[in-house]
């Protein structure tokens, strides 16, 4: 296969809040897998680079280099990060030069033949249809979850599994309980009548947990009790309480009671006890986002909160339907919580901000608790995130 490059939106804008300028869109989860991983599965190759000015210099350790967009030499495939393919293998063995991959008439990828140079997005050449889901913004990650998670979890039925843990109760087909080196205490309920439940190696599930599939639990995540349904949890999360139709990107903490529904939770987020999201308006109407003065029509009836990386909430935080909490924001205090919280806000009022040193000091403390060092590369990446978040 040719080299794979992921092309980010030129200007992510308000629709991709709170992740634009913080992390590549390609590194967000669409179903159980990141968008990049879905393209890699379709192409049967690892991505060579992510092309995006808004996240230049981003570093976490397991992603390809993130660099400025520019010409790409063939043979290569340049794929749109704002499109989530099904992951089914693409047969590109007999492609014509300058082939475009399209979905519903919209170009989402460009084949670059050997000896050719891709100058940037264009509409030239033959097109070939590809199945998947266009993503209009961060809120459509929930739409992708609904579309892909059932299929993603079902794919694990052929994976090596230790079977149903002793002392567990299964509602549905026991073969839909896929346990790959996880530790499960007696008394856990697996409801797989609507989809499989997948537990990756190193996962712990405590007594008093009920998992209603489809559910994917990433490596070393701890499920501490409560009711989890239709959700995906990236690596090293701590979750408890009621969670429905939500995406935890990784390294997030919700260790106490409280409801999180139809929400996206970024890396290193900590949700205080009884933090609760509303995911349905009293009118049952479509949810609109209000982001820094811009109104975005999501077309979704159910949408909770979008939490940016390193956001924190105090005990008892209540979030309205369609709230956006930007990266690094800390929510506390008596003031009413707005539906848009700016980056690195210190308190609910939103007027005070964290300092760069304060943000990095907190990040260092939080990351060290999971054994993740704040290396020079990670520090530089977070410094860029902070500068972009405050308009630097």
Image (tube, rainbow, N blue to C red):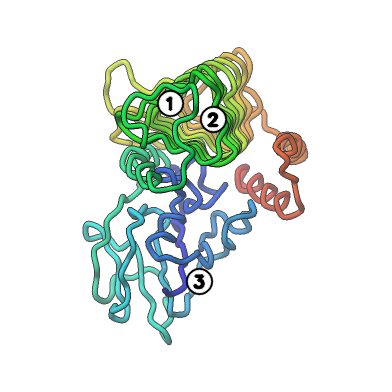
What percent of the width, then of the height, locates residue 137?
39, 44
**Coordinates of residue 147 in the picture (x, y in percent):** 31, 42
Residue that numbered label 1 is attached to? 211
Quarter of image, res 243: top left
Q: Residue at x 63, y 30 (%)?
A: 345
Residue at 46% x, 66% y: name it. 45
Quadrant where the N terminus sits is bottom left
Q: Earlier in the sequence, mark 1 or mark 2?
A: 1
Residue 387 placement, left or right of 223 = right
Marked residue nearer the N-terminal end (3 or 2)? 3
Residue assigned mark 2: 341
Determine whether, in the image, residue 311 is placed left or right of residue 304.
right
Judged from the image, the secondary structure of the residue bearing numbered disc 1 is: strand
- SS at mark 3? loop
Q: To which residue does mark 3 refer?
A: 70
Query: From the viewer's perspective, is the residue at label 3 or at label 1 nearer?
Result: 1
Circles 3 and 1 in contact, beta carbons < 8 Å: no
């Amino acid at each position: 296969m040719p080299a794979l490059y992921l092309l980010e939106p030129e200007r992510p804008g308000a629709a991709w809040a709170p992740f634009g300028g913080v992390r590549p869109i390609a590194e967000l989860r669409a179903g159980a897998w990141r968008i990049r991983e879905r393209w890699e599965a379709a192409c049967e190759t690892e991505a060579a680079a992510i092309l995006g000015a808004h996240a230049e210099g981003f570093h976490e350790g397991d992603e390809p280099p993130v660099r400025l967009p520019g010409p790409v030499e063939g043979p290569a495939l340049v794929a749109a990060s704002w499109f989530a393919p099904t992951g089914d293998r693409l047969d590109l063995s007999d492609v014509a030069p300058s082939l475009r991959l399209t979905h519903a008439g919209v170009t989402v990828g460009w084949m670059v033949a050997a000896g050719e140079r891709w100058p940037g997005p264009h509409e030239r050449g033959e097109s070939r249809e590809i199945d998947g889901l266009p993503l209009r913004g961060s809120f459509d990650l929930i739409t992708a979850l609904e579309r892909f998670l059932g299929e993603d979890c079902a794919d694990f039925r052929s994976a090596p599994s230790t079977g149903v843990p002793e002392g567990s109760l299964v509602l549905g087909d026991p073969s839909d309980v896929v346990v790959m080196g996880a530790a499960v205490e007696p008394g856990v309920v697996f409801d797989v009548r609507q989809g499989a439940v997948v537990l990756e190696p190193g996962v712990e599930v405590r007594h008093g947990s009920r998992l209603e599939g489809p559910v994917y639990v990433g490596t070393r995540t701890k499920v501490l009790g409560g009711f989890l349904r239709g959700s995906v949890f990236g690596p090293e999360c701590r979750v408890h309480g009621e969670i429905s139709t939500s995406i935890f990107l990784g390294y997030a903490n919700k260790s106490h009671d409280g409801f999180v529904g139809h929400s996206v939770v970024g890396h290193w987020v900590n949700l205080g006890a009884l933090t609760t999201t509303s995911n349905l308006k009293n009118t049952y109407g479509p949810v609109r986002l209000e982001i820094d003065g811009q109104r975005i029509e999501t077309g979704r009836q159910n949408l909770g909160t979008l939490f940016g990386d390193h956001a924190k909430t105090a005990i008892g935080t209540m979030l309205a339907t369609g709230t956006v909490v930007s990266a690094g924001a800390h929510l506390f205090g008596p003031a009413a919580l707005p539906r848009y919280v700016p980056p690195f806000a210190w308190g609910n009022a939103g007027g005070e901000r964290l300092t760069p040193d304060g943000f990095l000091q907190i990040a260092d403390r939080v990351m060290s608790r999971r054994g993740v060092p704040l290396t020079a590369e990670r520090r530089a990446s977070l410094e860029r995130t902070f500068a972009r978040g405050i308009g630097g």
